[in-house]
């Protein structure tokens, strides 16, 4: 079942590493878990194709300590789309 999910989220930097993320809401996390259980690996990771602006990339959702999924925003995407820490992003993801 292919389904595209769209959401907006604020970009944030992990204070312990040089990684940037957006967090999915509890509602969206639960919807993905419920609709795509067979595609979730034993660690809770979900492979997705993500898009912001005109840039697409393959990535993985993974559970944060809060239980909600987070999506890493790669450096190449941030540079191409001129995204900075704290920016509000429009994101589309498709579970693959």
Image (cartoon, rainbow, N blue to C red):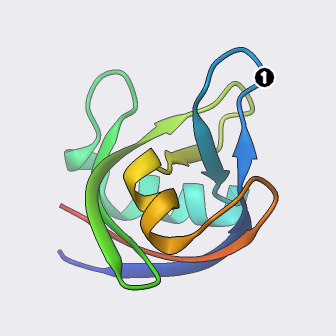
Residue visible at 61% across and 41% down?
A: 20
In the picture shown, does residue 70 fall above or below 64?
A: below
- Quadrant location of residue 93? bottom left
Nearer to us in this view, 93 or 19: 19
Residue visible at 61% across and 26% down?
A: 18
- Image coordinates of residue 65 in percent, x first then y, are 70, 24
- Residue 9 in view of the camera: yes
Secondary structure beneath dot 1 equals loop
- Residue 74 in view of the camera: no
- Image coordinates of residue 42 in percent, x first then y, are 29, 23
Q: Name the residue under label 1.
A: 15
Apparent side of residue 80 relative to residue 66 in the rendered image (left or right): left
Which quadrant is the C terminus positioned in?
bottom left
Nearer to us in this view, 1 or 63: 63
Apparent side of residue 2 relative to residue 88 in the rendered image (left or right): left
- Quadrant location of residue 66? top right
Residue visible at 54% across and 34% down?
A: 63
Mark 1 crowd level (few <14, some 14–19, many ≥20, 10 Å Cα): few
């Amino acid at each position: 079942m292919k389904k595209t999910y769209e959401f907006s989220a604020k970009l944030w930097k992990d204070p312990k590493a040089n990684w940037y993320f957006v967090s999915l809401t509890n509602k969206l996390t639960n919807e993905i878990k419920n609709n795509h259980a067979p595609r979730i690996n034993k660690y809770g990771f979900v492979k997705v194709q993500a898009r912001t602006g005109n840039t697409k990339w393959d990535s993985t959702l993974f559970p944060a300590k809060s239980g909600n999924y987070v999506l890493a925003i790669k450096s190449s995407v941030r540079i191409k789309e001129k995204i900075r820490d704290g920016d509000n992003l429009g994101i589309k993801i498709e579970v693959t």
